[in-house]
Amino acid sequence: MPHGQSIGLGLAMGILARVVLLRSDYRQYPTYPHGYASHLFLGIIAALVGAVSIPALIAKEWTAVTFFVIVAQQFREIRSMERDSLAALEETQLVARGSDYIESIARVFEARYYIVIFVAASAAYGAERGGVLLGIVLGVIAFAGSTLVIKPEPLSRSVEVEPAQVNFKGADLYVGDMFIMNVGLEESRKSILEHGIGAILTPKTETARDTLANLGQRQAILHDVAGILGVKKDIDTPEYTPMATRNIQTGRVGIFIVPEERDAGLLINIIKRTPVLESARGRSLYRKLS
């Protein structure tokens, strides 16, 4: 087989790239084992597309190249698959992800398959031109560069996060100096004071201020916090619902939650690691252009 070495290396590097990218994180997705199985299978197909495309181009098999382009376009459906899967789970979530977070996750999963195709094609090209070693080097460079491009920006880059005391003024609940909501039941107020924790988010720039104004971004923060710390909430206890309230004048946001694990330090770290959603990126950067 004249191109067997390059196709084999490209396929192996592409599959390896998908395995590295296939990991459960603090968002608890994908789940094991069904999510792993489906994504691994699709990863093998993507790796095969990338690995075979280079030898087909070299051999001037234009019909085959056209077929591979059509197959690659089918990976656009990955975004719809992930979106539908996550959206179906929203009704059973005590603290929902929100449509913005779901769309962001779906886009990342789609992009990962394009990375697999790119890595496989780069490795196959290197093997064709300079042997296995060059193919491995180009595959690694392609993987490192691609993952760097799609790496999400953590909220800590643009927002200051500080712990804040949960307190009451009468029946009004505050986190630091920020009003959150009114809690009528005395028993609930005692429980919130005992178990509740909070944080204040202060934007560093006008762009960050726009980001925190986005409802989807705030919902993503609450979902990540509740997913890791847990939440003392049920469908009939609205007073324990995690909240992210914004001060319109200053742009600061107060975060309140009654977690299963009361750890203020971990709360701060979770908020800092929350990714900035594409739909929530501040637009003040472009005001100078208008």
Image (tube, helix red, strand yellow):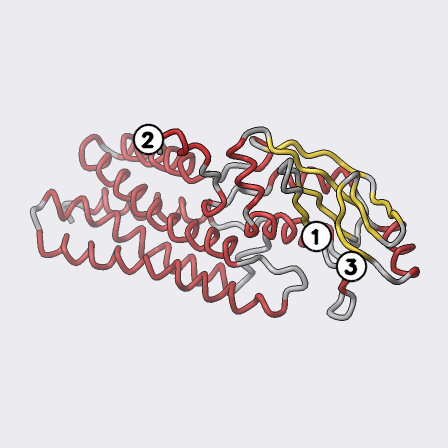
Please name the residue that numbered disc 2 is placed on.
Answer: 137
Q: Where does the image place residue 249, in percent across and percent down from the top left?
A: 64, 38
Front-lying residue, 105 or 13: 105
Under circle 2, the secondary element is helix
Q: Where does the image place residue 47, in percent across and percent down from the top left?
A: 31, 50
The residue under the point 19% across, 48% down is: 53
Under circle 1, the secondary element is strand
Front-lying residue, 232 or 19: 232
Q: Is residue 206 visible?
A: yes
Please name the residue that numbered disc 3 is placed on.
Answer: 240
Left or right of 164: which side holds 153?
left
Label 1, label 3: how many angstroms apart (C-alpha)? 9 Å
Q: Is residue 12 visible?
A: no
Label 3, label 2: how many angstroms apart (C-alpha)? 53 Å
Label 1, label 2: how many angstroms apart (C-alpha)? 48 Å
The residue under the point 41% across, 52% down is: 107
Label 1 packing within 10 angstroms: few (<14), some (14-19), many (20+): many
**Amino acid under label 2?**
Val
Front-lying residue, 112 or 22: 112
The residue under the point 54% across, 42% down is: 275
In this rendering, which labeled residue sits more in front, label 3 or label 2?
A: 3
Label annotation for residue 243: 1
Q: Image height check: is 42 above or below 287?
A: below
Left or right of 242: which side holds 10?
left
In this rendering, which labeled residue sits more in front, label 1 or label 2?
A: 1
